[in-house]
Image: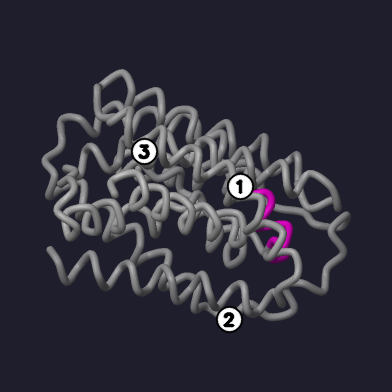
Amino acid sequence: MFIIVLFAIGFIGSFISGMLGVGGSIIKYPMLLYIPSLFGLATFTAHEVSGISAVQVFFASIAGVWAYRKGGYLNKSLIITMGSAILVGSFVGSFGSSSLSEGSVNIVYGILATIAAAMMFVPKRQLDDKPLEQVTFHKPLAAILAFIVGIGSGIVGAAGGFLLVPILLVVLKIPTRMTIATSLAITFISSIGGSIGKLITGQVDYAAATIMVIASIIAAPLGAKVGKTLNTKALQMILALLILTTAIKIWIDM
């Protein structure tokens, strides 16, 4: 039962990861925190949940990027600019998170989810009319925002995809499908720093992480395949509602 429940959590989160361009922690974090204990299987601490999430997101994002490798959706300049900044930030955040209380980790997660939810409901007019090869962005702003996202996401074991997507859409004005594919690549880079920090500070349950990783490798490409066929407005709305629901749940429990 323990294996089935964790596999299901990993599969659902990774499917959403591939479909919406997030690392999947936006849904896996609360699921890991609450569902295993409901079945009387295990009660993971906030630190253990963040550690499992960090390692699992690493593999989910790899699988998602591989599925999006064709079609011109990966913006290499954006990946390099934001990826390098978020890598440093995520390592700083994850390494320092071991000194925070469980309540503090949950509060950081709640704040990040609330900000991301608010950004997703900002109107995004004519965003997807621009040809992919003509997309440009403000590099210094992109790097600064990625570094800030890295610190916060490193603390909670998320790779920051659920914050990166609203930033790419609302602030940097990147088309939806390019946002989804590119954010997965940046999320992968972010998860490197986050995973190393969590492993060094002993916050990873290896048995649980292994089960989640196997689910990720299977589910993320399937989610990416579905994401390519859905209407971009539908993708944006699904992500907005998902983030909002998670933010509300976190704050109610605190």
Identify the element where label 2 is drawn. Answer: loop
Q: For the image shown, how many numbered marks are present on the structure?
A: 3
Among numbered discs 1 and 2, the one appearing first in the sequence: 2
Residue 180 highlighted magenta (yes or no)? yes
Residue farthest along the front direction in this orientation: 1
* Residue 37 picture location, percent across and down: 16, 54
Among numbered discs 1 and 3, the one appearing first in the sequence: 3
Badge 3: residue crowd in 10 Å (few <14, some 14–19, many ≥20)? many
Q: Nearer the viewer, mark 2 or mark 3?
A: 3
From which residue to which does the magenta span run? 174-182
Q: Classify 116 as above or below 32.
A: below
Type of residue at label 3? Gly
Residue corresponding to mark 1 = 184
* Disc 1/disc 3 C-alpha distance (Å): 16 Å
Among numbered discs 2 and 3, the one appearing first in the sequence: 2
Quarter of the image for residue 123 reads bottom right
* Residue 142 picture location, percent across and down: 59, 47
Q: Nearer the viewer, mark 1 or mark 2?
A: 1
Residue 154 tag number: 3
Residue corresponding to mark 2 = 123
